[in-house]
Amino acid sequence: MKYDCDVIQDLLPLYQDKICSDKSRAIIEEHISECVVCQKMAVQMGDNTVEEKLIKEKNNVIQEHQKLVNRKTTTIGMTMAGILMIPVLVCLICNLAIGHALDWFFIVLTAMMLAASLIVVPFITAAKRLMWVIVTATVSLVLLLLTCCIYTHGRWFFVASSGSVLGISVFFAPFVIAPLSRETKLQRHRAALTVLWDTIWLYLLLAACGVYIHGDVRYWYMAMTISTYIVVLVWIYVLIIDYGKRNGQIKAGILVALSGIWFGAANDVLNFFLAPVGEADGHGLGGLDLSRGFWADDITVLNANWLFVIIVVSVCVGGLMICSGIVKEKREHEIEK
């Protein structure tokens, strides 16, 4: 034998994992064909029966422990649900005894449902707990608002519910959409789906408010124009960040420059669209007069001067970031070559 057994045995783990060179493999195979001891060791290393059995036993222990934990949490959840049912039953009896009908009982019931969604649901759900808490809490809140509105004979339900759902969605919609999209082909578009959901509820809130106050043409025109101007910028952010092909510095530079222009030109754009309904205020870039200084006494000139400065600064900063990003991309391409 050309090589010592100790050398071959040191190389056997690499041989079994198939990460040694072809030359080393040939040497090892030649040696173990002649050496019974090294051959036996190679066979033992290749036998994964014990390792697989240990892994299986470990997985079984983990599964049994998880089942035990799930049983305990479910028991706790059901106990808490039973406790929450006590005031519901008491209110049911009192409502029937005093009013001989069910009216404010449903307010108590939906209020307890809201409490249960925050306290009980985390214990009785095995997966996606946060998602289910958010969904059940939102549904319970909407039902509570509905029962209160019916009980008070109000007509504010759609305003209150759409505003509540929008407020919840702005903060928590990503936590619901992310786990749902993870199981589908929509994972790549979860940011766009989140913004789409928020956009829908924003316009539903505007519509509900318009109906509630019996809004005239001026309301609808102003509400939709101003809201759309803001929503369009948010959608541009999503499209650039999520679907842009350039690096982060270039994207950030584009967004900085665009934000400055969008904000600086907001008065002029909105004045143009609101002029037909007589809501243009005239405080736009049209009053620009740098010769009078930034702290001019005229509020129109002061406003225009600072809007101009915001645009210039944001464009310059954004331009520098874009140039830096382009240079970085060129360097990366050169390194790859």
Image (spheres, rainbow, N blue to C red):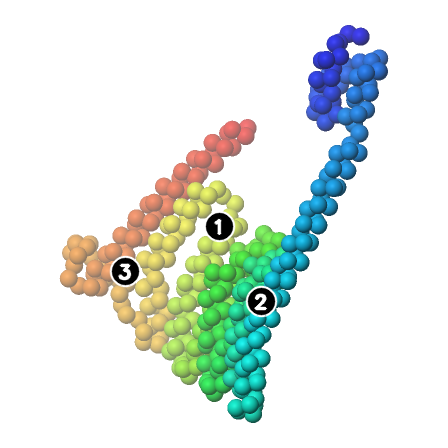
Write down the quadrant of residue 304 in the picture. Answer: bottom left
| Residue that carries the numbered disc 1 in the rendered image | 241
Residues under labels 3 and 2: Cα distance? 61 Å
The spot of residue 144 in percent (x, y) is: 51, 76
Write down the quadrant of residue 290 in the picture. Answer: bottom left
- Point out the tag, 3 or 2, that comes first from the N-terminus: 2
| Residue that carries the numbered disc 2 in the rendered image | 80
- Label 2 secondary element: helix
The spot of residue 215 in percent (x, y) is: 40, 81
* Vertical order, 115 against 54 (above or below): below
- Point out the tag, 1 or 2, that comes first from the N-terminus: 2
- Looking at the image, which is closer to me, 184 or 1? 1
Q: What residue appears at the point 84 percent right and 13 percent down from the top-left corner?
A: 34
- Label 1 secondary element: helix
The 10 Å Cα crowd at callout 2, few under 14, some 14 to 19, many 20 or more, is some
Look at discs 1 and 2 and give the one toward the viewer: 2
The residue at the far bottom in this view is 100
